[in-house]
Image (cartoon, rainbow, N blue to C red):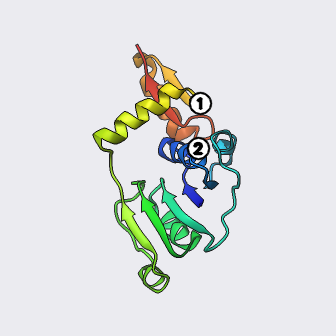
Amino acid sequence: MRVVVFGYGPIGLLTIFLAARAGAEVTAIDPVAARRETAARLGASSFEVAPAAADLAVDAAGFEETWRGSVDAVRNGGSVVVVGLGRAEGTFPMATIVRRAVTVRGQFAYSRRDFARAVEILAEGDLDLGWISEVAPADGAEAFANLVERLGEYSKVLLTP
């Protein structure tokens, strides 16, 4: 299976890891090139998308550019899952979706079963979490500002006592 993941944020990085772990060939796309190393460590094998080659595209960013990129990346009859909420509204390439029989669906949150499986995966210990920044609550404001201002260095902030 060929999977394309748009976005190297926490959801995108975890999607890359899980898809690669399941045996998929994973292409990862993001404008922040500094995060590529993390995506590669988690299983991405390519960083340039071939048009109409993927079976599945996961948009973990949620912008018009990534919506369109996801649709363009999948083969005829392929699937796009949008989980990113970068923009609430915008245009979508409906004619392309219809003519190429692309399935598009949104996904938000998780089930109790999904959460239990996530805990099992964490317990297995093969997920590299070095990309998560742990900071004290007192340093939280600065750490969250870094997520916006220093995209290449920060992907996720976890406040720890």
Question: Counting residues from the N terminus, which is met first, the one under dot 1 or under dot 2?
Answer: 2
x then y, percent, for residue 78: 50, 71
- Asked whether 59 or 55 is in front, the reply is 55
Q: Which quadrant: the C terminus? A: top left
Q: Quadrant of residue 62?
A: bottom left
Instruction: Please determine whether, in this image, residue 5 is positioned above or below residue 41.
Output: below
Which quarter of the rendered picture does the N terminus lie within?
Answer: bottom right
Residue under label 2, please give it: 21
Identify residue type, mark 2.
Answer: Arg
- Crowd rating for badge 1 (residues with CA inside 10 Å; few <14, some 14–19, many 20+): few
Residue at image coords 32%, 46%: 109
Q: Label 1: which residue?
A: 126
Q: Does 107 appear above or below 43?
A: below
- What residue appears at the point 34 percent right and 60 percent down from the top-left corner? 88
* Of 45 and 29, the residue lying toward us: 45
Disc 1 element: loop
